[in-house]
Image (tube, rainbow, N blue to C red):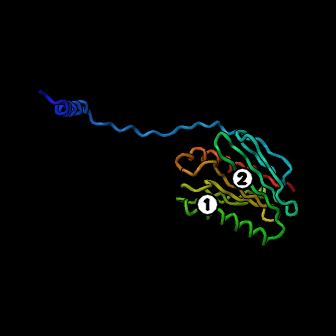
Amino acid sequence: MIRPKRFLIPLFTAGLMLSCGNDPIPKPRAYLRLDYPKADYKNVDVSLPFTFEKNKLSSKIRYIKADSLNNIYGIDIDYPSLKGTIYLTYKNVSDKELLLNYIRDAQNLTQKHAIKADEIVEQPYINTKSKVFGMFYEVGGNAASQSQFYVTDSTKHFLNGSLYFYAKPNYDSILPAADYLKNDIKHIMESLKWKE
C-alpha cells in the first residue's frame, strides 16, 4: 500500500524540476517618455509693476497684493497638467541696503535646498537693454524646488521665483516636467520688462 504523503513529495519535486527549464531574462531598461506641447507664450500685463510672457499651458495666474504699504505682490502660475506651480514674489526697492537684503534672502533660500540637492548650478542673467539683472539656479537631486531665480533693475524693482511640484520630490520622476518648466522660468526672465 502506497501512502499518499510519500507519493506526493517525489511527484511535486519532479514537477518543479521539469517546470524550471529556462533562465530568467531581465527586462530591458525603459525610460518614461513624456511629450509636452511646444511652448506658446503670451504677454501677461496685469496690475503689476512689470510685464512678462507666460506659457499658455499654465491654466491660470493668481496674484495678490501681500503688502500695500511696501508694494509686495505674490504671483502664482499654475500648471495642473504638470502638477507644479511657479511662485513669484515682487518687492519694491526703496534703498540699496534693502535690495542687498532681498538678494541675500533669495540666495539663502536656494542654499537651504543644498541639504537634499546633488548640485546647484548658478547661471547669471544680464539684459542691459531692459535693465534686468539676476541669477538663475538649477537645483539637481531630490530638493523641494528644482529651479529658482531672482532679477532686479538694481534701483527700484526686485522679483524672485521658485518652482514647486505638488508631489514629494523624486528627481527621476519629475525631471521631464522640471526641464520643461525650467525653460518657462528662463522665458519669464528673458521677457520681463519693468514698468516705469
- Tell me which amino acid carries mark 2: Tyr
Q: Position of residue 48 (x, y in %)?
A: 84, 52
The residue at 84%/47% (across/down) is: 46
Question: Is residue 145 left or right of 150 when viewed as pictured?
Answer: left
Q: Position of residue 43 (x, y in %)?
A: 79, 43
The residue at 51%/39% (across/down) is: 32
Q: Sequence order check: which comes first, mark 1 or mark 2?
A: 2
Indicate the quadrant containing the C terminus: top left, top right, bottom left or bottom right.
Answer: bottom right
Q: Position of residue 23 (x, y in %)?
A: 27, 36
Residues tagged 1 and 2 counted as in contact (Cβ below 8 A): no
At mark 2, the secondary structure is strand
Question: Is residue 25 left or right of 161 when viewed as pictured?
Answer: left
In the current view of this chain or complex, which residue is farthest to the left?
1
Q: Could you give the CA–CA distance between mark 1 and mark 2, rounded to whole angstroms?
A: 19 Å
In front here: 144 or 136?
Answer: 144
In the current view of this chain or complex, which residue is farthest to the top?
1
Q: Residues within 10 Å of mark 2 (few under 14, many from 20)?
A: some
In the current view of this chain or complex, which residue is farthest to the front?
1
In front here: 92 or 191?
Answer: 92
Whether residue 19 is situated above or below residue 86 in the rendered picture: above
Q: Residue 87, which numbered label? A: 2
At mark 1, the secondary structure is strand
- Tell me which amino acid carries mark 1: Glu
Q: Nearer the viewer, mark 1 or mark 2?
A: 2
The residue at 86%/50% (across/down) is: 47
Q: Which residue is mark 1?
A: 122
In front here: 62 or 124?
Answer: 62
Question: Is residue 28 left or right of 159 when viewed as pictured?
Answer: left
